[in-house]
Image: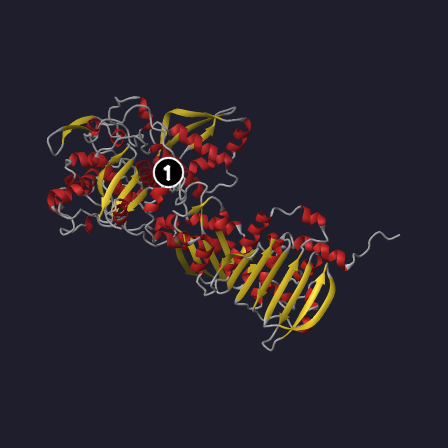
Amino acid sequence: MAKIHVLDEHIANQIAAGEVVERPASVVKELLENSVDAGASKIDVTVEEGGLLRIRVKDNGSGIEPEDMEKAFYRHATSKIAHGRDLFQITSLGFRGEALASIAAVSKVEVLSASGNDGRGRRIVIEGGKLLSHEDETSPQGTDFEVKELFFNTPARLKYMKTIQTELGHISDVLYRMAMSHPNISFTLRHNENTLLQTLGNGDLLQVVAAIYGTSAAKAMLPIQGESLDYRVSGLISLPEWTRANRGGMSTIVNGRFIRNYGLNQAILKAYHTLLPINRFPLVVVQLEMHPSLVDVNVHPAKLEVRFSKEAELYEFVETTLRGILRKEVLIPQVTKQQIRRGDNSSFIQEQFLFPRGPLKDESESAGYGQQGPLGKTAGLDKTTSEDDDLDAPADVAPSDVQSVPDGNGEGQSLPLPEAPPEIPPSYDPLGMLSGDLGSNVLKQNYSPDENPHSDEASTLSGSTGANADRAAQDALPLAEDKGLSTSQAQASAYRPNSVNSPVREGRSSYNPSAVAAKGERSWKAPSLPDPARLASAIKSDVSMPAFPELSLIGQHHGTYLIAQNQDGLYLIDQHAAHERVNYEYYYEQFGNPAQASQELLLPITLEFTPSETEKLKTRLAWFEQAGVYLEHFGGQTFRVRSHPFWFPKGDEKDIIEEMSEWVLSERSIDVAKMREAASIMCSCKASIKANQKLTDQEAEVLIQRLGSCRQPYTCPHGRPIVVSFSTYDLEKLFKRVM
């Protein structure tokens, strides 16, 4: 007796419905796609009890011909494609012809449709896949599709439905995605007579975002536009200050179809690299247009996943376009009166600093430049303070002799001065930010007497331009003059690559309040540096950042925040985050060519790992060499470090290499760029000043200057904001000076 038999059509449709109709939201999605494909400009969706009791989708599209009404509910009956080659040129949202048959198999369906303006239409009623009636009826052009008692004949499916609110949430999400995919269509969603969504259908995507996420979210959106030979991208992306706790706000749309694609999401997040706090995600609506032959949508039952024929090119295009848009914006979040009142901290997850016990240091203890400032200690000052030295930023060069040098006021101050200019390897140029340091390396040929009031004094030092010491003295002189420092002091600070006392390059305008107050002159600005070709891979965009605000230092709050001002308002700067950004860009450049800056260790550093980690690490030793760290197996579970870059933060070398080892062991796939990025973040965090560390005014001013010279001075490498602004208008409102 034969054991194999063909299932009847009714059972086959119920099985197919299990794939197509997962929940009420699946029904809404399929019906919406049909309405969009019919060219509708207005679609109304009404649901009751989360869609389990009733779903109604009404549109003003082209409608269904009377003779096609019954045929539309046959399996694999469709008007979208006719030949196999059409699968490679799909321009419609639906094409399989499975949806209507699957919906009718598990519900009670009633459809009224007319294909013309003559009022001639047809009504059809189907229950559980069986045709009950069909009759002619007058109707305006369009389709009115009503689904009742979903899963009435499949109680097992009905049993596993979630709560009404959960199902309604899924339906709302479908409407939101469809509205953002087609802003030219007016969508309305009602649940139990309550209107949940209504869009105008005027093609304004920003209005749709405002209707879905609110006006405050819409105000934080940036328009995007880009085009290549194969792709066109448009849409909206949020400022980094507007984030969400999950990826639910990331919508990617391809040829009018909302999709989920891991690669596209990663490309978007890479564009926000170092701009977002940890575990926060942007609100984006990215609309992509491409030739249908470049995307395959026939790979998922719900058509939510697609395959691209040129994935790498597409991801690179999206990442570069979005990064370019973000680089054009001044990304300093503003604090409003309303946020102050309600204590709004939803935009960012701030790191909480743990302040050491005991009172803050007295102002007199750190008034002298370089005496107690942690940035001065890093250059090798005598450490005679408390046990809090573990919070200090480590030195970046070998300790040098400490000499007492009189400052501009004649007072003796302890500053590290090298006896002779250190011999620096050719690959390491501490005088130029783009070649390693965040300091100066200002090109002498760019100076002009009009721009540099110290050009006469500087010209006296140009006799031995081939020496690094003379270059350092010449470049540091304007800053030294403005701040009342001697030339030898400026020359000494120029050799500290991680100190904020080094002169700054002109990436953006810098503000020297001392010079302005004392001489009544405009602040000195260093000329801009050329962009080397080797930075193209790091920046991946030739879009320049907007000018960082010119700020005048007011003071320091709680040893953690710098307070500054300009004509626009008040600014709070997180000193740790600011120094971390400065250090990050410095170390990122250094890791670009670490091998030539490596130093042999007299006493190798030893590290121990578990047996499984040891076996894995032995296969990945070459990746450490990419970062300038020469690690070798020393037997058993022990490894030893023979050499590492000399610019590693002093005292933290072992910790950094251990963290690098953990990162290498945890990563499934490693490349040079990821290794460089991770190592830079590790070093910058270790080398930065911490909370409750007093800075002198001069140190704070230079830190602000060096922050302004960064390529991206608005967030730390972990995505936390560096600067927060209070506009003058908002401050006046707080004090009722304006109403």
Q: Percent position (x, y) of residue 620?
A: 50, 35
Please state which amino acid type lies under the numbered disc 1: Pro
Residue 424 left/right relative to 652: left
Residue 92 left/right relative to 583: right
Asked if residue 625 can be seen in this view, the reply is yes
Question: Taking 721 as reference, is 134 above or below it?
Answer: below
Residue at horizontal 66 percent and vertical 46 percent from the top = 160
Q: Percent position (x, y) of residue 688?
A: 33, 34
Q: Percent position (x, y) of residue 641?
A: 42, 28
Going by the picture, which residue comes out furthest to the bottom? 118
Image quarter of residue 517: top left
Residue at horizontal 40 percent and vertical 40 percent from the top = 718
619 or 181: which is nearer to us? 181
Write down the residue under mark 1: 594
SS state under label 1: loop
Question: Taking 313 as reference, is 40 above or below it?
Answer: below
Asked if residue 440 can be seen in this view, the reply is no
Residue 607 left/right relative to 545: right
Question: Taking 128 as reference, is 534 above or below it?
Answer: above
Q: Percent position (x, y) of residue 439?
A: 26, 41
